[in-house]
Amino acid sequence: MQNDDQFIASGEPKSSIEKASFTWEAPSNIALIKYWGKTEPQLPKNASLSFTLSQSKTITTVSFTKLERPYETVDFTLYFDQVKQESFRPKIATFFKRIAQYIPFIHEYSLVIHTKNTFPHSSGIASSASGMAALALCIMQLEKALNPSLSEVYFNQKASFLARLGSGSASRSIEGPLVLWGKHDRIPQSSDAYAIKIPNAIAPIFSTYKDRILLVDKGEKQVSSTVGHELMVDHPYAEARFTQANKNLSSLLDAMETGNLARFIHLVELEALSLHAMMMTSSPYFMLMKPNTLAIIHHIWQFRANTNLHLCFTLDAGANVHLLYPENETEQIDAFINDKLLSFCQNKHYICDNVGFGARQLP
Ligand code: PMV
C-alpha cells in the first residue's frame, strides 16, 4: 500500500511569502513500455517506462500573490501564448481540486499562470504531460520557498506525484533520461504514486537516442486517452496485457543495461503495436493509426532488413510515428527519413527531438 499522506504539506510554513514568481520548463516524454488502463485516483494497472525528451516542452510561469483571506477553491487565471484561455480552465480547475489536499497553502494565494509549448498546438502531440509537470513544479517551488528544508528527492517525488494527478504520463516528465512509473518487482523503490529515474546504469548509447516525430495527423483524436483508459476496465484481454507490459518492462531493462539494440527494437515495437491492439479490440473498438502510419511502419521494416541499422518506431495514442535511433547512425537514417518517409506526413511536417535529462527551473 502506498502512503500518500507523506505528500501532505505539513504545519505552519517556515517562512512567510507575500509575492513570488517561478518559471519551470518540463519536457514531454515518449513511453517505451505503455501505460493503458488505470484505477482511481489515476493509478496505473501496469508499470510504464519512458524516454524523457528534450526539445518538446512546456514553459510555465506562475505568479503567486497572497490573498487577504484564504479562498475556498483555488484562485487562478490562465494565459496560453499570452492569451487568456477560458477553454483550459475546467481541466486545470479539476487538477487543483485533486491536489489541493496536498498543498493546503495554495488557498492563501491568487495564481496567474502563463504557459506556452515549444511544439505547435495542433500537431497531435499531447501537451498534458509537459504541461501538468511544469505547473506541478512551479507549485512545488512555492512549497520549497515556504519550507526551505525540503530535500531534492522529496521535491521531485512530490512534483511527479502532483503531476500524475493531472495526467498519468505527466508523472514521467520531471526527470530523465529513462523514467519508470508504477510498482514493479524489479525496482524496489518504484511506486504507483510517482515516477522515478531508473537507478540502474543503462548502456550509454541510449542517452544519445534521437526521436523524430512524424506528424501523420495533426487533428484532434477521435477517441481521447481518458476514454481509451476507461475501455480497459471491461476489456477481455486487459489482465493479459498488464502482465505482458510488466514482463516486457523487465526484458527491456535487461536489453538497455546490456546495450542489446536488437532486443530493444523488438520490445519497443511490440509495445507500440500491443497498445494499438488494445484499442482495436476494445468495445466499442477504435483505431487511431491511419493508412500513412502503416505505410511508414512497413518502410521501416524494409529499411532495417536492407541495412541492419537500428531504426525503430513507437506510437502514442494517435497516428503520429516516433522514430527512435542512435546518434551514431544519424546520417544514413536521416537520409532515409527525408527521402522515403516525409511524404507520409501532413505537409511533410515533423519534429526533431532527442533524449533529455528532465525539467529545469528558469531564471
Ligand atoms: O497520461 P495519459 O492519460 O494521457 O495516457 C497516456 C497513454 C499513452 O501515451 C498512450 C501511453 C503512455 O504511457 O504514455
Image: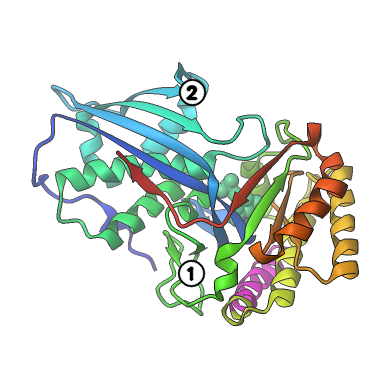
- Residue drawn at (80%, 34%), measured in percent from left and top? 346
Q: Residues within 10 Å of mark 1 (few under 14, many from 20)?
A: many
What predominant SS class does the magenta segment belong to? Answer: helix
Q: Disc 2, ligand 1: is the CB inside 8 Å?
A: no
Mark count: 2
In this view, the residue in front, 47 or 52, is 52
Sequence order check, earlier mark of 2 and 1? 2
- Residue drawn at (50%, 65%), measured in percent from left and top? 182
User: What amino acid is found at the position of numbered circle 2 in the picture?
Assistant: Asp
Residue 34: x and y, percent?
Answer: 64, 60
- Residue drawn at (75%, 62%), measured in percent from left and top? 312
Residue 51: x and y, percent?
Answer: 56, 59
Where is mark 1, residue-wise? 183
In this view, the residue in front, 296 or 132, is 296
Residue 119: x and y, percent?
Answer: 58, 36
Q: Quadrant of the C terminus?
A: top left
Where is mark 2, residue-wise? 81
User: What amino acid is found at the position of numbered circle 1 in the picture?
Assistant: Lys
